[in-house]
């Protein structure tokens, strides 16, 4: 898929103020600093579209971007940010989980995982939470430019093995780098495929 346009639409903490759910939507989620915003900029080929930072905790809201006037891409705040207060963490839980559970046009949740790390409990638990609720998700391993391909593949395999303790089948996996654009076209291709099968929620049963 060619990204011809990518525009910021709005930022929200309230689920009832989100844009109409009339277009397919894809959310990017994962630990703070894993590279969500950077990947969104790589996918759209627009540096600075989603705000990035070396300091974790940069993205605080539900940020909607519209791509090709045809689908929504959503940048979410990261989980597991140690410097955040308990109250902030509880707020994150509440509004992000509410968003994930209630957004009817959400086609796929891309869970981003740092390819340099051994499987982390917080990521596995989050995947289980999604799986238990039947929410569709795929895994994107980030920052693959920071080490050898072999090392990334090893960590992907370990994560897969860990998930197989809970899942019969492991969701689709991508290995990416926002620096080298590794895997970026594959993610866009998958989104294109899902978009082609999308029908507006309101039109179902009409
Ligand atoms: P929060 O919004 O705080 O949750 O973080 P985030 O997940 O959006 O991470 P962000 O995209 O802001 O990136 C965090 C840091 O990692 C920045 O310094 C990025 O430049 C760096 N980074 C992100 N992706 C990559 C990558 O693929 N390769 C390399 N080398 N650095 C990356
Ligand atoms: Mg961010």
Image: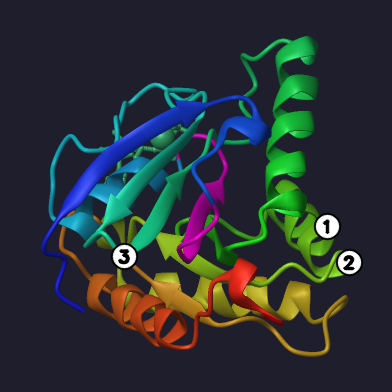
Q: Is 51 located above or below residue 27 in the figure?
A: above
Residue 86 on the magenta segment: no
Residues at discs 2 and 1 in contact (Cβ within 8 Å): yes
Q: Nearer the viewer, residue 187 or 18?
A: 18
Q: Residues within 10 Å of mark 3 (few under 14, many from 20)?
A: few
Q: Secondary structure at mark 3?
A: loop
User: Which residue lies at the image location 88% right of the left edge and 66% below the top edge?
Assistant: 132
Q: Secondary structure at mark 2?
A: helix
Residue 195, horizontal then vertical, whole percent: 42, 79
Label count reads 3
Q: Is 188 located above or below residue 49 in the figure?
A: below
Residue 25, horizontal then vertical, whole percent: 49, 60
Q: Residues within 10 Å of mark 1 (few under 14, many from 20)?
A: few
Disc 3: residue Cβ within 8 A of ligand 2's nearest atom: no
Viewer can see residue 35 = no
Q: Which residue is mark 3?
A: 70
Mark linked to residue 132: 2
Q: Quadrant of the C terminus?
A: bottom right
User: Which residue lies at the image location 80% right of the left edge and 54% below the top edge?
Assistant: 125
Q: Residues within 10 Å of mark 2 (few under 14, many from 20)?
A: few
User: Which residue lies at the image location 64% right of the left edge and 27% below the top edge?
Assistant: 14
Residues at discs 3 and 1 in contact (Cβ within 8 Å): no
Q: Which residues are magenta?
A: 21-33
Q: Quadrant of the N terminus?
A: bottom left
Disc 1: residue Cβ within 8 A of ligand 1's nearest atom: no
The reply, left or right, for residue 150 in relation to residue 3 is right
Dividing the image into four quarters, tell me where ligand 2 lies.
top left
- Counting residues from the start of the chain, the first of labels 3 and 2 encountered is 3
Q: Which residue is mark 1?
A: 129
């Amino acid at each position: 898929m060619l990204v011809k346009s990518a525009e910021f639409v709005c930022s929200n903490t309230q689920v009832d103020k989100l844009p109409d759910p009339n277009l397919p939507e894809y959310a990017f989620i994962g630990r703070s600093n894993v590279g969500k915003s950077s990947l969104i900029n790589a996918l759209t080929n627009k540096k600075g579209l989603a705000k990035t930072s070396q300091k974790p905790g940069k993205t605080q809201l539900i940020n909607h971007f519209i791509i090709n006037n045809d689908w929504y891409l959503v940048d979410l705040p990261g989980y597991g940010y140690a410097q955040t207060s308990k109250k902030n963490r509880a707020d994150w839980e509440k509004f992000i989980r509410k968003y994930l559970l209630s957004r009817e046009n959400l086609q796929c949740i891309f869970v981003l995982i740092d390819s340099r790390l051994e499987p982390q409990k917080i990521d596995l638990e989050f995947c289980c939470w999604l799986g238990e609720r039947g929410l569709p998700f795929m895994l994107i391993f980030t920052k693959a430019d920071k080490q050898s391909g072999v090392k990334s593949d090893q960590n992907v395999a370990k994560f897969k093995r860990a998930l197989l303790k809970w899942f019969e089948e492991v969701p689709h996996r991508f290995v990416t780098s926002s620096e080298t654009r590794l895997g970026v076209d594959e993610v866009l291709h998958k989104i294109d495929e899902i978009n082609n099968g999308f029908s507006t929620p309101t039109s179902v049963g009409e």
